[in-house]
Image: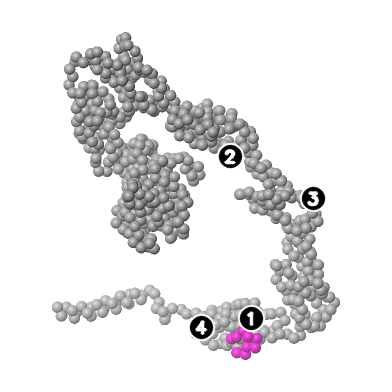
Amino acid sequence: MNKKLYFFIPFISLLILCISALGACGRPVEDERLKVHTVFFHDNYQGIYAKITVEAGQSITLPANPSRTGFDFVGWMLSEKEDATVAYDHLQPLNDNITVYAKWQRNDAVSLVTLKFLNYRTMDEIYAIEKNSVFALPENPIYDEDETYAFVNWYTDKECTQVYDFDSAVSSDITLYAGWSKQKAYLTIDYNYIGSPAPVVKAVKLGEAISVDAPTRDQYEFVGWYTKPTGGEPFDFETPLDSNVTIYARWSRNAYNVSFNLNGGVLDDSLSLSYLVAKNTSIETEAETIEDALTYVGHDFAGWYMIKTNPNSEDPLPQEHLADLSSINDDLTVYAGWTLSEYEIKFDYNFENPPEQPAKQTIKYKKYIQNFSVLARDGYSFGGWFTEPGCLNQFTLADTPVVSNLTLYAKWIEDAVQYEDIKVNYYYDIGAGDVSHALVEVEYNGTVGNNSPQDPVIANYVFAGWYRDKAFTTKFSTSMNLIADTNVYGKMLKKYTFEAEAVNFHDKLGQGTSTNSFEEGLIMDHTFVRGGNVSNGYFVRELYYYGASLDFVIEAEEEETDAVLYIRASSESYQFFGAKSKEEGGPLYNFISDTDFKIVVNGEWEGAEPKTWLAYGGMYLPMANLVESGDLSTDKTPFEDIFIIEGLTLKKGTNLITLLVSNNKNHGGTFHSEAPIIDCIYLYSSVELTMFDYEYYLKDGVKRG
């Protein structure tokens, strides 16, 4: 062991020496770097005159001598004082930065005349004339390019009360001041509305009457010029100006924007839904044209309303909000009001000479027929209601919504005939063929009723109901009368995970609890959330401002009408204003409503604001657990899967799911809105779903968090 140690020590020493030598290669050491020094030449009355930089240890060549009216240059000194005596020796090697100062000697043979123009734009001018000589009258100066003041004379005092005599000899230094007389005023023309052209400024001669052309503005009539933006008096153009003044345009609306919201209705694209309407005129003709072309399955048009109503509600429409379209005097959006269509349902006992037929029912669109007792028929058992006399298609009253006028026919089963029990086979398929789930036996002409098997539970799938066909077009009803063995098929929705960090962050801004970020800066890694079970290791934060959003662009292979949406989310450092428990006595959650955090699926937008979004009831977000209240990044609560909605429709092709912050609940600092931190979304679907993955935001080698 000792021999090996003796060999190892010199080897390590040699290795360190080599590394040191290699580290020095290609970069100069401190002593080898080029050093330079600068001499700053100060003219000692205006500022820095020149500077000269040379290598350390070198001498310099002096710059050209400066000049100064009425003074002779003496030389460059090491002090700025007038009586400085130590001159700068420029032949000495320069080993440090230094400032030297010009020394001046007053020329006693001249007098200095300083002209001050008092117009806030012209620099003072200094003239040197022979002592006891006469200073020649200079050219009249100009106050400004608009000549708002006329030059009067030169004065010996700043107040311009003593006129200077240009015939007098100048025996000492003097200062002369330009005197001015106001001859014009500034007229500022303010068009006085948001987005207006910039105010126009004109120079107008005093004492002259002025005129200004009437401006124009879309949808407004010009009223006149006033002395204030609001209120004030009409400006008097007959009175000549004697000072600067601003006049403001006054406007009156002469046209208004009217928009028609179909509220679920469908209209031919050739008809416009937005109009510009002259003040106090009618738009009833346009409204009637829209009404005549408007359709909505299962609904009847009931007028235009000032508020949006629920087209599927059975409540009466609020007549106090009916829109008056006969005389428009404001911008407005009107909404189509709808009532549910009513259908007549007739019943036929479907045998000769029944004592009486059941009473007719009037049922609203997609509502259900009321069940009732049927008559007893000797030798027969009632076998349900069907849509044709031959009783081929059963109509189950309890779970089949009404969508048209109907006549339903009773089916009868002879009691004298003996029948075997009916077998109901339950299957599901998750890609490997039919899997037998359960077998239920019922009496002939009986129903499954409450004997349905438990729903299948399979990892990464959601069960979406039992159907009578593999295409999942007709749901199986447990109240259906069964007279033949039947197969039913479970619709299974596969889980698809779409990561928040994989959406498009191009030009996307983030606003955090104490920082702001840009593009990939919104992405954090799992170390920021201790034990958070972060999907894929990354999540998105810093959405704390109104309008912050994430867009998931989902491609669906076919249309899906039963999709289920979850969001995997949590919350960060603050207790939301709406924090509450899910149940009484339970832990506190940060609650955010479905209007404060909107989820928009293939919605309509008006600019940056959605017209429609999911009514999902809000989200309960896990509360951040701070070990120390001042630490914004310690011990965050893990993410949770939050159910949003089922029965979601995704169209074939491209679907846009937008998560949008829509609140201004300010917690101070940069925390301007309440928002979740987002890990991913889960979509359960029976059709194939994909999303373009912008993974390059994670491929820069930067560790997040």
Mark 3 or mark 1, which is nearer to you? 3
Coloring applied to the structure: one colour
- 163 and 110: which one is in front? 163
Say few, some or many: other residues with alpha carbon within 10 Å of mark 3 (under 14 / 14 to 19 / 20 or more): few
N-terminal label among 3 and 4: 4
Q: Secondary structure at mark 2?
A: loop
* Residue at the image point whose x is 71% and y is 85% from the top: 106
Q: Amino acid at mark 3?
A: Glu
**Label placed on residue 689:** none
Q: Which residue is mark 4?
A: 96
Residue reaching furthest to the bottom: 85
Is residue 82 on the magenta stretch? yes
Q: What's the CA distance linking mark 3 and mark 1?
A: 57 Å
**On the image, numbered disc 3 is attached to which residue?**
238
Task: From this view, report whether residue 183 is shown above or below residue 80.
Answer: above
State left or right for residue 584 relative to residue 433: right
Residue type of the residue flagged with mark 4:
Asp
Report which residue position mark 1 lands on.
44
Could you say which is closer to the camera, residue 317 or residue 262?
317
Task: From the image, tell me which residue sits under label 2.
Answer: 331
Residue that extends furthest to the right in the rendered view of this protein: 167
Three-letter code for the amino acid on which mark 1 is drawn: Asn
Whether pointer 3 and pointer 4 mark residues with C-beta atoms closer than 8 Å, the reply is no
Decide: marks 1, 2 in contact (CB < 8 A)? no
Where residue 369 sits: x, y (%)? 36, 24
Q: Which residues are magenta?
A: 78-86
Q: Quadrant of residue 223?
A: top right
* Residue 387 percent location from the top left of the image: 33, 19
Rounded to the nearest angstrom, the CA distance separating label 1 from label 4 is 21 Å
